[in-house]
Amino acid sequence: MGRDLTPLFDPASVAVVGASDDPAKYGHAVASQALRAPGRRPVHLVNRRGGTVLGRTAATSLSAIGEPVELVVISVPAAGFEAAVDEALACGAKAIVAITAGFAEAGPAGLARQRTVADRVRAAGAVLVGPNCLGIADNTTELYLASDRFAPGGIALLSQSGNLALELQLRGEPYGLGFSRFVSLGNQADVTLVDLVEDCARHRATSAIAVYAEDFGDGRAFAAAAAAAGKPVVLLTAGRGSASARSAQSHTGALTTSADVVSAACRDAGVELVRTPREMTVVLAALAALAAGPRTAGRRTAVFTDGGGHGAVAADAAEDAGLDVPELGARTQERLRSVLWEQSSVGNPVDLAGMGEQRPLSYADTVGELLAGDEVDAVLMTGYFGGYAASDGGLGGGAAGGSVLAEGETRAAKEIVAHLAAVPKPLVVQSMYPRSASCRVLAEAGVPVFSATEDAARALAAMTGRAASGRGGGPLPPLPPAAAPLRDPGYHAVRAVLADAGVPFPAAREVTDEAGLLAAAAEFEGPYVLKALHLLHKSDAGGVALRLADRAALLAAYREMRARLGAPAYSVEAMADLTDGVELIVGVNRDPRFGPVAMVGLGGVLTETLRDVAFALAPVPAGRAEELLRGLRSAALLDGVRGRPAVAVAAAAGVVERITAAAAAHPEIAELEVNPLLVRPDGALALDARAVLH
């Protein structure tokens, strides 16, 4: 069930330590907010000088209050923080909100102080938010312990930035967005982002969870909590574009960035990942429109416009957002022609071509036909709609007949709402006049209306499921139990670990001299492959010889390679049949926050050049692995091109599952890679493997 945070969000009593009459001090802002609901619970103000604060008598200490206090806000200088915590715990506090800064963010000494305080709090059976936070608020329990007010609503906002939280509040206002809770995360010394996501998932008044986080702590646990939340989680984070600080020694490590890891975690957990506060607001507005029902799994989108330019731009924006804009079928086109005039376009985008000015109800007729079509999952309406009823002008607004058009447009909006009630599919509107009377009719009925085309497209993507193929929530595959540690990262030791996991390899033997070479060649038929061992990138160094027809060719290649490279050991292997094969790469990189992250893609010597790869949290189930492979830019190669047969994608996916499970079971492995994984029509075979230990 997770940690019990009831004392944090619905305490029996509250005290603000450091309450002040000085508007420049944070203790003033928090105390002012705390007093907004004096009848809900006792609120005590504490100032070491006593006297009055905000017109109320202030206690000189928590002990001087004379009764237990369940939640204590501490806003005092850092030098007095530990003493304030100790006194709060002695007075029975079960929750502490620490505004005071100067701990982990100040360096190692501050981190040590922070850990000591957190240990004291946990030992007392209490919980601590912060330190270095900006407070909390819960509109459902009338708990106001932050410097600003948050409009009531269904969004729980968990943020490491106070200013970003305020921006989201301001941006959400035009869309009627409000907040059930606000928590400033601070340093997460005790109560973590994971704890809060789990608690907000159980909170009935919360319909969506919005997160701004720079430090995930345990990123894997965050992904698991979000996946199990049962309600939408929207994440805005910073620093996703920087590569791992550790020097990568494999293709997998070199190609895996923080952005890839966070994106993979969000995709697997069903989290909506956004890049800006504006995009977060757009997605939250879209999700609010879905409160009455689930999002559709389909992405087939009809773009509907009253002008060719808006239609073309919206179609591009929809595809950029991960939606499909297919040409409509003959049956749907015929139905559309029955309600539109001859010059209208009905292929997709659907364009009224000026008919709206003659008959505003044509907007509603067209939306009705599109919603009714079996081949349409969602509708994006874009362009001038709203202009006829706009009070600030618009075509016909000041001309003869303008009021008639305005009335017709408003009536069309009401009929669109009726069509949507009869056939509930996602509908999003982009309008040049989003505040017009007709657009307000749509917005009040739950239809998201935006002024920017890209916002409308992004909102529709959020309403129609994942913009790209993904799991979309549900429990994450658990990490396997840790296996016996791999001590030797040598080639044959790594092969043995993978082979024990069921990964198929060609026959191979390690040799150190000519006698061993000839003995190995006698164990299986040629042609042979010779590899110089203890070289990380063997091909780049000329340490791989292929298609050695017989023992004589193998011996000659060995002598030449040994003279040139001087490697102490070599591998003699059976040459795989490369006919009709596709080379893939499968790797696992262990991220310090999210644990093992898998990469699959087009492999061989061109891996880093082509960079056609996809990512997921490891281990990767076979079904998910096949989705990743089918989503590659080069996926057409898997199904056969120019007369080549299709390869065994399902077999490859099964091998991906076994490779990623083996890597996930070895936390001592920083990077593991199979490249290439040869996939042929009759199965999959690993041709090379490497590992890098932490």
Image (tube, rainbow, N blue to C red):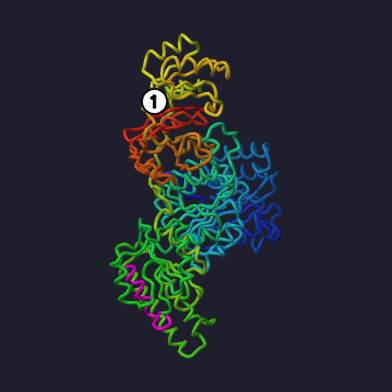
| Picture coordinates of residue 82, whole percent (x, y) | 65, 42
Question: Residue 223 location, x and y as percent?
Answer: 46, 44
Which residue is disc 1 drawn over?
A: 505
Number of residues whose C-alpha sits closer than 10 Å to that of mark 1, classed few (under 14), some (14–19) or many (20 or more): many
Please state the horizontal and vertical placement of residue 257, each as a whole percent of the image. 55, 42
Q: Quick one: quadrant of the C terminus?
A: top right
The reply to whether the magenta stretch includes residue 364 is: yes
Identify the residue at image location x=41%, y=17%: 550
Quarter in which the N terminus is drawn:
top left
Stretch of the chain drawn in magenta:
355-371
Q: How many numbered discs?
A: 1
In the figure, 569 relative to 122: above or below? above
Residue 124 visible here: no
Q: Residue at x 63, y 50 (%)?
A: 99
Q: Which residue appears at 58% of the width and 19% of the height?
A: 564
Q: Front-most of 178 and 648?
A: 648
Hey, what amino acid is under mark 1? Phe
One can see residue 642 in this view: yes
Callout 1: SS: loop
**Of 565 and 319, the residue lying toward us:** 565
Q: Is residue 34 magenta?
A: no
Q: Answer above or below: position of 453 versus 62.
A: below
In the displayed structure, 53 sits above or below 78; it is below
Residue 169 in which image quadrant: bottom right
Residue extending farthest left: 331
